[in-house]
Amino acid sequence: MNFEQAWNTFRTMHDKLHAISHALGVVQYDAATVAPRGSAEGRGKTMGIISEMSYSIQTAPEVNEAVAYLLENKDQLTPAQLREVSEFNKSNEFVSSIPMQEYVDYTVLINEAEDVWHRAKQENDFASFLPYLQQIFDTNRRFALYYKPDNKPYDTMLDMYEKGLTMEQADQFFSDLRSHIVPLLNKCMQAPQVRDDFLSRHADIATQRTFSDYLMEAITIDRRYCGIGETEHPFTTNFNKKDVRITTHYHEDALVSSMYSVIHEGGHALYELHSGDEYEGTFLSGGVSMGIHESQSRFFENIIGRSRQFTTLIFPKCQELFPDVLGDVTAEEFYRAVNKVEPSLIRTEADELTYAIHVMIRYEIEKAVIAGEMQVADIPQEWNRKYKEYLGVDVPDDTHGCLQDSHWSGGSIGYFPSYALGSAYGAQMLAKMKESIPVEDCVAEGNLTPITDWLEEHVWRHGCMYDPGELLERAVGAPFDPSYFVRYLEDKFGEIYGV
Amino acid sequence: MNFEQAWNTFRTMHDKLHAISHALGVVQYDAATVAPRGSAEGRGKTMGIISEMSYSIQTAPEVNEAVAYLLENKDQLTPAQLREVSEFNKSNEFVSSIPMQEYVDYTVLINEAEDVWHRAKQENDFASFLPYLQQIFDTNRRFALYYKPDNKPYDTMLDMYEKGLTMEQADQFFSDLRSHIVPLLNKCMQAPQVRDDFLSRHADIATQRTFSDYLMEAITIDRRYCGIGETEHPFTTNFNKKDVRITTHYHEDALVSSMYSVIHEGGHALYELHSGDEYEGTFLSGGVSMGIHESQSRFFENIIGRSRQFTTLIFPKCQELFPDVLGDVTAEEFYRAVNKVEPSLIRTEADELTYAIHVMIRYEIEKAVIAGEMQVADIPQEWNRKYKEYLGVDVPDDTHGCLQDSHWSGGSIGYFPSYALGSAYGAQMLAKMKESIPVEDCVAEGNLTPITDWLEEHVWRHGCMYDPGELLERAVGAPFDPSYFVRYLEDKFGEIYGV
């Protein structure tokens, strides 16, 4: 084997895996958006067979040999090539550690589980989802132990979503956050309350669809490369940097629900759409971690989207489209309403302040189940107990409780902490950005370009070239520091609530 | 090699090809329905790579050996197994005759061509589509010659869509049809005209979507397994018998356009949804030929859907949903309006009588281009000339002329005659069905079960077990006879127009 042969083997393997992942990604997107309800069985078979092909391509002996050769001849690789081969090698060590049949069975399980979860959520039927959830937790724990037998399994899972993250760090992070958020929350709750009754007025869904298009444009998304679908649970997926899809869910009585899910998913989309051209068609294309991804989505949703400047900017359009909802409301009332602080049931609709508590509850449950300290069957009661304890709310049913999120049915365990980390990363980026850009003024003028240029330069274009910690440090010139997020929250809600 | 090994190799190869075809099918469906406009390039690469995998699986030496072994040991195969192996062998001879790179390039070409056609149709820009159309005609001619070097290429193409069909037969069929249709058409045009002005009144698209769901139910489609999408050009695709998709196109000023496209595609869907369980997961699953497929779609669209009994049955619902369109119209006026005979521009919206002429024009153009007697660049002027000559209409632009159909951009050359054949097959099936079933009474009562049972028994459940000619003969107890179709037209339009 020579260098060229090894590199060609590696490249061809990438292209095949990427093609398969593209096709399977479309199959999953179709399943979540428009596929007929009864079609899961045939799709499961297809996904099983194609996963098997993917596994065989990735773990083929000639690929292993090529990777070994390339890693032994590092000096012939550019930094990007070296990064690509090393990163692939890690993911390959994970995949190769799993027996093929278990890998395939898991793909089939996830396809079925998403279908069962969807119905279970609609029908408040945790029992029907329980056997799937049990298998998903068990399989994830088993896979983590195959991969790193000496690690605590949940540490391995956290590391897969946010490289370097451990339970020790996450415990510290959440405990810090909680110690600041809870007193601030209490102060807000005791202050005069913000009016938001008008947000539940009837908003026509066809008009909400038009509004989504407007919002996508407002946050600079090039629609030639980004579609909007409709699903139970909003998400973003991408097949390459010129084919990104976001989804949302419209509610007639909750205009801002789809509004902020579109802006949130739009933030994810921007990150993928602006991945560096030099990484396209390589393993380094696209977002590097879920934490950095959530930093972008939550940056657009909250730091931009829930700012006084942005809500004021788009308010005339909102009034024009929804006169029955906002005709008798001022821009300032609208701003305050979308920032109302209130302990609530649904994570995706939570305010910025209580949001981290929602995430923390999920984190604690995952950690306890994976450690064997909580049974999967006990999740509903533990969920409800924690919502009462941390947020003071009574969970009426599992639909509004532990069945609300799609992550577990999709096999994502260890993902949730990324949301809270992302919020904190975003606040730190904002602080850095403000050193050179008048962020508020730009948003007020509807000129997001300096902001998106900054993000493209410091985050988006780098794809997976750097680990998340390094990427953040290069962007802000300092290590991760959650105190920026705490200060951001204290400033923003202190002003709104006068506390 | 023993029998079991050979059969396992064959079965595994089928399963892989089916999985790939399922995934690629979803990718294409997504492309036609919801994919962002700028996403064609990445999709093309993926489709190229996956087609290559598919080609390699199908033409692998061990598959050839297994097929040869099985065909040498026919006596160990059940009739269905023998049929499956023989049919696969034929399609494999076709695929194997094409050099792999050309096969892959063609997949990529088609992906691009569909995108270009879509824009060309919207912008009335034949010139931009011409180079693609040229390549599609050229490639199809070349592939036909690779496969059967001694055949006339267009005969080979016709045979691929409708086994056994030749230009000689098609010429005869169209000439017979024309000799009856043209005089009848002339008589209808001279009779007092039918009123249909109300059909272009404004019909809300959201309500048309609701109407589509109603129509699907009216023709007995099980929606758990059949979705409706929206595309420029309506079509049906299926991934297995529990996952069928139809599409339609809504026009605010043409309610019956989507109405009959839904019923037409619904007929295709019924055929796929009711393929025999014993053939599921084999090469014999699903519709056997485009002619038989069109016989089912056009049976539902016209013989059922445009019958006085059906239009009367659904008329109250139509009035309820579209009071502004049909409030001042009677059921009889509605029936006559949807059967108005009028030479027109658009095939999919043509009446039953002139429809075959639209098909004939396409057939004659394809035949001439493949024979080298017409240039692809001359298609627009030839198209317009024939529309004037045969139907007396002036084609205002290519959007309403040779760019109207999606077939050529999808690589389907030789497909069109299936539509006219299908209409004729359907009329012959109707005559046979009426010997045992009071078809009109059943439709009038809204009880389609005896009709769908007959079709399931004689057509749908047989999948690809018999060649189309044999299937028809088994169903009606006689060889194909187009005179049933002529009589059906003469009876129906003679009554409506009193001629």
Image: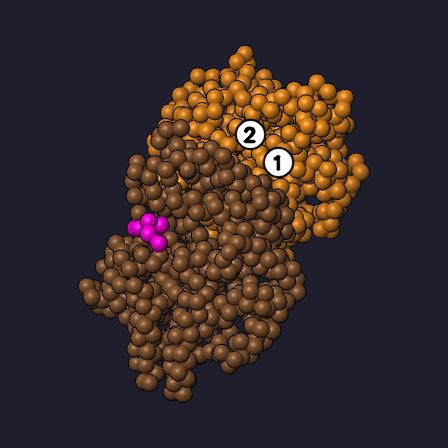
Chain colours: A brown, B orange
Residue B293 quadrant: top right
Looking at the image, residue A180 lies above or below residue B274? below
- The overriding secondary structure of the stretch rendered in magenta is loop
Mark closer to the chain start, 2 or 1: 1
Q: Which chain is disc 1 placed on? A: B
Graded by Cα atoms within 10 Å as few (under 14), some (14 to 19) or many (20 or more), the crowding at tag 2 reads some
Q: Residues within 10 Å of mark 1 (few under 14, many from 20)?
A: some
Point out the image quarter for the N terminus of chain B: top right
Which of A60/B296 is in front? Answer: A60
Residue B298 drawn at (x, y percent): 62, 38
Residue numbers of the magenta segment: A461-467
Residue A185: x %, y % from top left: 40, 81
Instruction: State which quadrant residue B289 falls in.
Output: top right
Q: Is residue A64 above or below residue A291?
A: above
In this rendering, position of residue B179 left or right of residue B28? right
**Residue to which mark 1 is pinned:** B15
Say whether residue A80 is visible: yes
Q: How many marks?
A: 2
Amino acid type at mark 2: Ile
Residue named by callout 2: B57
Q: Secondary structure at mark 2?
A: helix
Q: Determine the image quadrant of residue B59.
A: top right
What chain does badge 2 belong to? B
**What residue sits 40% from the left and 40% below the top?**
B42
For the residue pair B312 and A283, the one nearer the viewer reads as A283
**The furthest residue to the top:** B150
Element under disc 1: helix
Residue A433 or B465: which is nearer the viewer? Answer: A433
Q: Residue at x 42, y 64 (%)?
A: A419
Q: For the C terminus of chain B, give its image quadrant.
A: top right
